[in-house]
Amino acid sequence: MPDLLKKPFGTHGKVHQITPADAGWRYVGFSLYKLRAGETASEQTGDNEVILVVVEGKANFQAAGQDWGELGSRMNVFEKTPPHCLYVPNGSDWSVEATTDCTIAVCAAPGLGGHKARRIGPDGITLTARGEGTNTRYINNIAMENEDYCDSLLVTEVFTPAGHWSSYPSHRHDEDDFPRITYLEETYYHRINPADGFGIQRVYTDDLTLDETMAVHDGDVVCVPRGHHPCGAPHGFEMYYLNVMAGPLRKWRFVAAPNVEHLM
């Protein structure tokens, strides 16, 4: 069975660390810090560019030789307000000092030195509906294809209401054949409200040589190396996820699963 479901390895400090080597792929890295007020974290970006996403809480940021001040405003991710984020290029360092309890995601992919450090959001990020009926969900685009902030990274937040599906109709982006489809590795950082609930994520290929269905709980990460990857939020539990994608081309082109293509 592929090791696609990553449980947090703690409740405090760095609780996730997924590298390309860990995931068995080439591009996407993802880490997560849960800090208490007054605590600090710091890293060097090395060959990667990163986007630091303040999922919850507030912190003071230093990065790429600049003081960015205090970033963050929402204290609970399910407030659904736009996130405060910071882009840091490769060959840099960053540090944070929490001013409240906070959760900070580190989204990483190869950097080319093509962009300077900059704030992303909350201005310019608008919660947008996608889909219809019980396929409706709400998107905060942080750095998707239309935002020229990054060399490799594609990053977005998705809020899925209770009883709805998301990342659906099922689709894949696992071939390097632009403009028909692009190869993009992907991670999903899940949150569930209430936190004692659960959601469902399936990862499968058309030929079912990969076919995994996972119960995801608050704080879990799912790795999607290939195949389709729909999510479901049961009645009574709403779902949030932070997506990180990257590949050889910073374009998001996908192909629907044959049995749901008519729903696109």
Image (tube, rainbow, N blue to C red):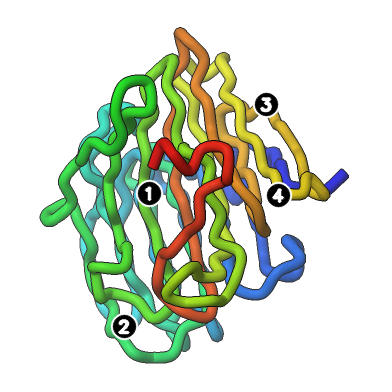
Mark 1, mark 4: which one is toward the viewer? 4
Tell me: residue 181, above or below residue 232. below
Q: Which amino acid does label 1 sit on?
A: Ala
Q: In this view, does 158 lie to the left or right of 35?
A: left
Mark 4, mark 3: which one is toward the viewer? 4
Q: Which of marks 1 and 4 is nearer the N terminus?
A: 1
Q: Earlier in the sequence, mark 3 or mark 2?
A: 2
Residue 182 or residue 73, whichever sits in front: 182
The residue at which mark 2 appears reads as 65
The residue at which mark 3 appears reads as 215
Most extreme residue toward the top is: 236
Q: Is residue 252 left or right of residue 42?
A: left
Number of numbered discs visible in the structure rendering: 4
Image quarter hosting the N terminus: top right
CA separation in Å, label 3 and label 2? 42 Å
CA separation in Å, label 4 and label 3? 18 Å
Residue for point 46% across, 83% down: 111
**Location of residue 233 in the rendering, given as x and y in whole percent from the top left corner:** 49, 21
Mark 2, mark 4: which one is toward the viewer? 4
Q: Are marks 1 and 2 in contact (CB under 8 Å)?
A: no
The residue at which mark 4 appears reads as 205
CA separation in Å, label 1 and label 4? 41 Å
The residue at which mark 1 appears reads as 98
Q: Earlier in the sequence, mark 1 or mark 2?
A: 2
**Location of residue 240 in the rendering, given as x and y in whole percent from the top left corner:** 42, 33
Most extreme residue toward the left is: 123
Q: How crowded is mark 3: few (under 14 residues within 10 Å), some or many (20 or more)?
A: some
Q: Quadrant of residue 9?
A: top right
Tell me: residue 253, above or below residue 6. below
